[in-house]
Image (cartoon, rainbow, N blue to C red):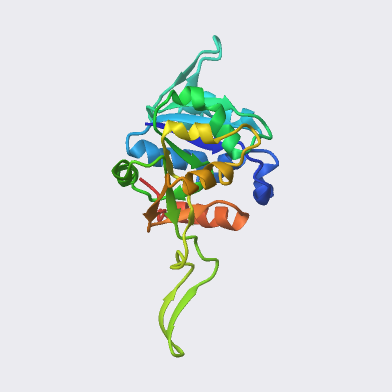
Amino acid sequence: MKVIILAGGFGTRLSEYTEDIPKPMVKIGNRPVLWHIMRTFAHYGHKDFYVALGYKAEVIRSYFLNYSLINSDFTVDLSSGVIDAHKENIIDWRVSLIDTGLSTMTGGRVKRLANAIDNEPFLLTYGDGVADINIDLLLEFHKSHGKMVTVSAVHPAARFGELEMENQRVVSFQEKPQTSQGWINGGYFVIQPEFFDLIDGDATVLEREPLEKAASMGELMAYKHEGYWQCMDTKRDRDHLDELWNREEAPWQV
């Protein structure tokens, strides 16, 4: 199944990094967060990616254009200029990089990819959120209900430690757990192509009119992902994800 990844926003809340690069190219470990997200989908066999570009699109283009050289050892013949990548880390992804406009809203970016999707169901997510989500189970759920859209509902991560108490006795202490209350939009959508008809144009915000209308029509279902999910919104988030990866404790690693 084709996978759309929204990667065109300005990433203003992560300005420590995004003055020079787009948010999806901020690194966790030695790889961009975009790569981590794509690897999750690829693990489940979904390797046909459509990346919706906007802010600093050239950085993402350059990364994939030079992917083999960036991620492999190589030999340069200085007399001829011929470069021979050793290609130890070959991946069989197909990546289409589509400029969807600098100021286009999230819904408009999705709409601009309608022709590329070619009237097929597709997967969609944001270029800044990692999860240990099982894509097979997500698709199974989507097929079971027959509605237009499935969104992955997640518990947001807490900023502080959580105390579970009986009277004044602490019976459980968890350092920054996934919160046990409330569900939010975690991305990782499965969408039928009819959804494109609910998007007016470039100014449409995905999370407003299109999804609100799908909900009012009874065509929006939520897949409850009880596992790990984290959006990389701030430097604190990035540092936390980076630490998990470097300690080889990243829940989303596949």
Looking at the figure, which quarter contains the C terminus?
Answer: top left
Residue 40 as seen in the image, left or right of residue 28: left
Residue 102 as seen in the image, left or right of residue 91: right
Give the camera-side residue of 137 and 216: 216
Residue 59 as seen in the image, left or right of residue 219: right
Which quarter of the figure has residue 155? bottom left
Total numbered labels placed on residues in the image: 0
Picture layout, residue 137 above or below residue 104: below
Looking at the figure, which quarter contains the N terminus?
Answer: top left
Residue 206 as seen in the image, left or right of residue 86: right
Residue extending farthest to the front is: 217
From the top left corner, tell me how far across and down residue 232 is, in percent: 55, 51
From the top left corner, tell me how far across and down residue 249 is, in percent: 40, 56
What's the residue at 68%, 38% (across, down)?
Answer: 20
Give the camera-side residue of 121 and 156: 121
Give the camera-side residue of 186 and 37: 186
Give the camera-side residue of 1 and 47: 1
What's the residue at 52%, 44% (across, down)?
Answer: 213
From the top left corner, tell me how far across and down residue 187 is, in percent: 48, 46
From the top left corner, tell me how far across and down residue 3 is, in percent: 43, 33
In this orientation, does residue 5 appear? yes
Picture layout, residue 46 above or below residue 243: above
In this orientation, does residue 66 appear? no
What's the residue at 41%, 24% (across, down)?
Answer: 86
Picture layout, residue 186 above or below residue 195: below
